Image: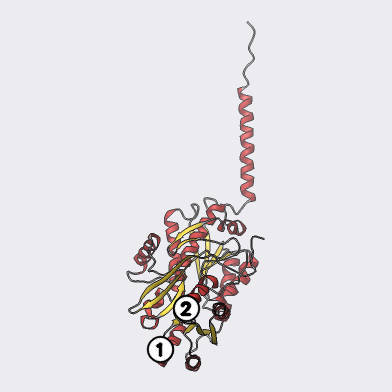
Amino acid sequence: MKNRQPSNTNGISRRAVLKAGARLATVAAGSVSMPGLLRASDIIKLGFVTSFNGTTSLMALCQHNCFMLGVDELNAKNGIGGRKIEVIKEDDQNTTKGTLDKVRKLIFSDKVDAIHGLVASLEHVAARSVTTAAKKILVYSSYYEGGVCEKYFFGTGLVPNQQIEPQVKWNIENLGKSVYVIGSDYVWPRMSAPIVKAAYQASGGKYLGEDFLPLGTQDFGAVLEKAKAAKPDVVWSFCAGADFVSMRKQYLALGGLTPHFAAQIDDVVDELLPDLTEGVIGLQAYFMALDNPQNKAFIASYQAKHGKDKKINAVGEAAYTGIHLYARAVEKAGSVDSDKVSAALHEVEFDAPQGHVSFSRTNNQLRANSVLAKGLAGGQIEILKNFGQVDPIVPNCNLRA
């Protein structure tokens, strides 16, 4: 009987082990070379900047509360891809210098992965001078004058073709063909007024005049007299925060002006100043009166945390929507790397309190909803028309190229 050769099981095992070891070494080397990949020990570190003090603080507090509601919801479940979110908050005090200082701190000292928040346009302009150069994602959650076309900038608020143009058409059809604009003297009102003018003129209307006053103005008497003399069908206010309050009080006290008044009203302003917002017509992406399951759940969660009768504004809803979209994009990208997250933000969607939303691949603005409403007596808001989801337009912007 011939001797059998011993089987080579040990050799095969060694080769299998060597191959497996090589594969593991490759994976390990890959993880070292890709620090942006999410790992179990990671914390997602985000900066939140807004004007807790200053002209727009009325809007900013709700913005902060809604953003943190979204963060708490995510952390209570799985965080972002299993990683908890840590938020570092800063007050820019509604100033350019304050914004620059706080954004630089967050990026270069705190090493945040992205920045959210900001209300006034002067804030996003200042913040972008830092975030764009540093290649950090900035999610700006306020309606604004538009015109930004940058890879790392994402806007979750309305731009003019979503907010101003639909309202102009409705105004002309329902209120009359002429308008007079009064605004605060900074970027948003200055850049919004020409869009109002062009929209009125394109629809056969008349733009009768405009006035811009410094932030913090107390006396609007002279400009209101000018508006009264022009006899417009609509007075359109682009006065910010506390300046809106001063202007509207004096408008009502003067008398003799058109009853048709347009402004960016919201539920928070209407709650605090019902006598001032009664009769005011404005367009936002969000009002609490929207009837859908997501909004009902959103309101219930917010009021359980902040008080039974607390109101929510459009800037707040945009901040809440922004953190949920950002979280989905990071999970899709498997990374906090800005280039990867920027690409993934174009691929995610969200059923927000305002309705279904997603980002435009062309300009990084939200394909948001446009909702026209009117303030009623007693701090209530009536929805006049829901235009639904509207594609944002940023002239001469094509980030696909």
Could you tell me residue 110's position as x and y percent? 56, 65
Q: Which mark is residue 147?
A: none
Q: Nearer the viewer, residue 394 or 295?
A: 394
Viewer-proximal residue among 261 and 69: 261
Q: Is residue 219 above or below residue 87?
A: below
Indicate the position of residue 347 as horizontal and vertical percent values. 55, 55
Residue under the point 47% across and 77% down? 173
Mark 1 packing: few (<14 Cα in 10 Å), some, or many (20+)? few
Query: How far from the left and from the top, in percent, is residue 260?
Result: 43, 83
Residue count near mark 2 (Cα–Cα under 10 Å), binned few <14, some 14–19, many ≥20: many
Work out whether 330 lies above or below 263: above
Residue 196 is drawn in which quadrant? Answer: bottom right
Residue highlighted by disc 2: 171
In what quadrant of the picture does the C terminus appear?
bottom right
Query: Residue at point 47% right, 78% down?
Result: 171
Q: Helix, strand, or loop for circle 1? A: helix
Q: What residue type is labelled 2?
A: Asn
For the residues labelled 1 and 2, the Cα–Cα distance comes to 20 Å
Look at 56% across and 68% down and name the residue there: 106
